[in-house]
Image: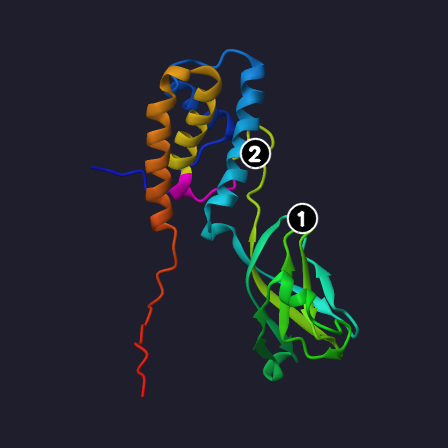
């Protein structure tokens, strides 16, 4: 038998909302319900940022440092920084040096935050405008290279598809259905919440780095 030969299935926002309403045992009949569902969808994206890593939202970013710089803005769409290095040189002379991430208290206790040198530590302030504070302050031109978790993009217009990896589409649908049940189908809250949590757990278990890990026991002498 012939197969489609395609692997591009996705759901637009309006199709996703329609599917979620059907799981609530109802059909969407009013424009307000569509707007309400999009609002719930955006809140669901924010909740996912609190649940842990979403690998498709991890990306490498860079910020230029000039002499005297001890902080750089990371952008409002940055959720957190996972790791960072200081890059010197270019081309074949390029070198990346690992820097340590320190806590707010450790950064606060540094006696002279304006002393200059090659940055070796970074404190990430997770405010409404995330900022990276490096220590020592740059004594020349460097590049801060880091892997960040970015925010999932908003739903936007109803013909858009979502900024979600295809493996999370079942979880996204069940999660939106649960959110809508809180408002429109209270009798289905329990079962839809259970389905959503199971779908999320299954997707989250698959959404992980599969690199090899070597564990060596410590030996005392």
Residue under label 1: 76
Residue at the top extreme of this rendering: 29
Rendered residue at 55%/27% (across/down): 38
At 50% from the left edge and 25% from the top edge, which residue is drawn? 14
Estimate the x, y position of residue 26 in percent, counting from the top left. Answer: 41, 13
**Residue 117 x %, y %:** 72, 80
> How many numbered circles are shown?
2
Q: How is the image coloured?
A: rainbow
- Of callouts 2 and 1, the N-terminal one: 1
Residue 142: x percent and y percent?
70, 74
How packed is label 2: few (under 14 Cα within 10 Å), some, or many (20 or more)? Answer: some
Q: Which mark is residue 36?
A: none
In this view of the protein, which residue sits in the foreground, 35 or 123? 123
Residue 182 visible somewhere in the drawing: yes
Can you tell which mark lies on residue 155? 2
In the rendered view, tell whether residue 146 sits above or below residue 95. Answer: above
Q: Residue at (54%, 12%) from the top-left corner? A: 30
Callout 1 crowding tier (Cα within 10 Å): few <14, some 14–19, many ≥20:
some
């Amino acid at each position: 038998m012939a197969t489609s030969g395609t692997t591009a299935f996705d759901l637009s926002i309006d199709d996703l909302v329609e599917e979620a309403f059907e799981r609530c045992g109802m059909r969407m009949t009013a424009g307000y319900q569509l707007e309400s569902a999009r609002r719930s969808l955006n809140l669901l994206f924010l909740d996912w940022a609190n649940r842990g890593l979403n690998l498709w939202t991890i990306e490498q970013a860079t910020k230029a440092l000039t002499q005297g710089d001890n902080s750089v803005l990371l952008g409002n769409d940055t959720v957190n920084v996972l790791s960072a290095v200081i890059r010197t040189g270019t081309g074949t002379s390029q070198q990346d040096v690992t820097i340590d991430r320190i806590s707010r208290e450790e950064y606060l206790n540094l006696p002279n935050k304006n002393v200059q040198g090659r940055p070796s530590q970074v404190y990430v302030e997770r405010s409404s405008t995330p900022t990276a504070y490096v220590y020592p302050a740059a004594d020349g031109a460097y590049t801060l290279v880091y892997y960040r978790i970015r925010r999932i993009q908003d739903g936007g217009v109803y013909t858009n598809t979502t900024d979600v990896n295809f493996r999370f589409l079942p979880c996204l649908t069940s999660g939106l259905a649960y959110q809508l049940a809180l408002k429109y189908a209270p009798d289905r809250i329990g079962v839809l919440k259970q389905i959503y949590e199971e779908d999320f757990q299954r997707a989250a278990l698959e959404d992980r780095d599969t690199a090899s890990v070597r564990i060596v026991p410590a030996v005392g002498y």
